[in-house]
Amino acid sequence: MANKKRNTILFVVLALGFLLMFFASISLGSVTIPLKDVVASLTGGQATKSTWEYIIINYRLPKTITAVLAGTGLSMSGLLMQTLFRNPLAEPYVLGLSSGASLGVAFVILGAGFLPSFLSVIALSSYAIVLASTLGSTLVLFLVLIVSQRLRNTMAILIVGLMFGSFSTAIVSILTYFSTAEQLQKFTFWTMGNLGNLSWSNIGILTFCVGIGLLLSAKSIKPLNALLLGENYAKSMGLNFKQARLIIILATSLLSGAITAFVGPIAFIGLAVPHIAKLTFHTSNHTILFWSTLFFGSIIMLFCDIVSQMPGYDVTLPINAITSIIGAPVVIWLVMRKRNF
């Protein structure tokens, strides 16, 4: 009863924290917009200045929604992988999906110089980059799924994912060696991550992909609880392990692949957020961890987005760097606080 009351209080605090970060992310930036004008614009009213309303609807709100989708999707992917592989260091990127997406983008950006001029312009468009990223991560997804049908040991799949990642990284290194400074600069900017380049149609596609991934994750809550004591115990409980593993891998690939395609690779969230949720709620029950991970993922990503915007300045820092700078000390502090991490 005491734990239930404590969890209820924690979820209320997280819900309030989410609302605070959501409105702060829209309000703060190079131009600070009062909260009352933010609320008025989002509820169909009129802001004090028409330019504020234009900024909110066309720039701040899409970026904030993208941050929520990226935070929830990546953190959920990390939770699924860490339970499936029973490894605290497991996350979507060890399956090579991020590296596959980077390889697709590298082929487009760094290989555009070898194409005719009119094809080069098309290849360097934002839509082509998103398409290349999606194809790269999807290709690795299918390879991992094919391998997972032949391997029974989940640790073996983890190692195969790392090998796919290493192979993709090596190809990217070769491409960068033969590239011009301009091509390298464009590719480097993509790898830094960006939450603010999505149109409303892109956000609709990303919302659909993340929604499907979260539904598959919710369907996996019971199998994940059974997997806490290992594959053999889960099978003895009547779990169809092969089917459960396929659904978990599919959910992870869909979430991380779609997010990487649209906003670039983002570090720390998938690795650290599940641990923060476990240490805060003191539980391994995935019914609680599912919701707490969603809240923590969105709150932390929104906070990182606010920091990257440098409120009051006309400078935007790379979101990928901010998540690592803020996340690494938090994880170290949590590990030192609980030594049996």
Image (spheres, helix red, strand yellow):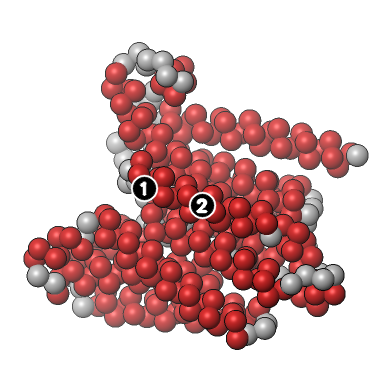
> Residue 186, percent across and down?
25, 60
Instruction: Please tell me which residue lies in front, 23 or 40.
Output: 40
- Tell me: residue 275, above or below residue 60: below
Residue lying at the far right of the rendered structure: 1
* Residue linked to disc 2: 210
* Residue linked to disc 1: 202
Residue found 72% across the figure and 73% down from its top? 241
Q: For the residue carrying disc 2, how many other residues have a C-alpha within 10 Å: few (<14), some (14-19), or many (20+)? A: many
- Tell me: residue 55, above or below residue 170: above
- Tell me: residue 332, above or below residue 158: above
Residue found 60% across the figure and 86% down from its top? 150
Residue found 29% across the figure and 18% down from its top? 50
Position of the N terminus, as image quadrant, is top right
Q: Left or right: where does residue 34 sit relative to residue 17? A: left
Q: Left or right: where does residue 98 sit relative to residue 9? A: left
Q: For the residue carrying disc 1, how many other residues have a C-alpha within 10 Å: few (<14), some (14-19), or many (20+)? A: some
Say if residue 6 shows up in the picture. Answer: yes
Residue at disc 1, secondary structure: helix
Count how many numbered circles sit on residues in the image. 2
The quadrant holding residue 133 is bottom left
> Residue 208, percent across and down?
48, 49
Position of the C terminus, as image quadrant, is bottom right
The label shown at residue 300 is none
Q: Left or right: where does residue 234 sit relative to residue 73? A: right
Q: Amino acid at mark 2?
A: Val
Q: Amino acid at mark 1?
A: Asn
> Residue 128, percent across and down?
26, 60
Instruction: Please tell me which residue lies in front, 107 or 6.
Output: 107
Residue at disc 2, secondary structure: helix
Say if residue 337 shows up in the picture. Answer: no
Residue found 28% across the figure and 22% down from its top? 51
Residue lying at the far left of the rendered structure: 117
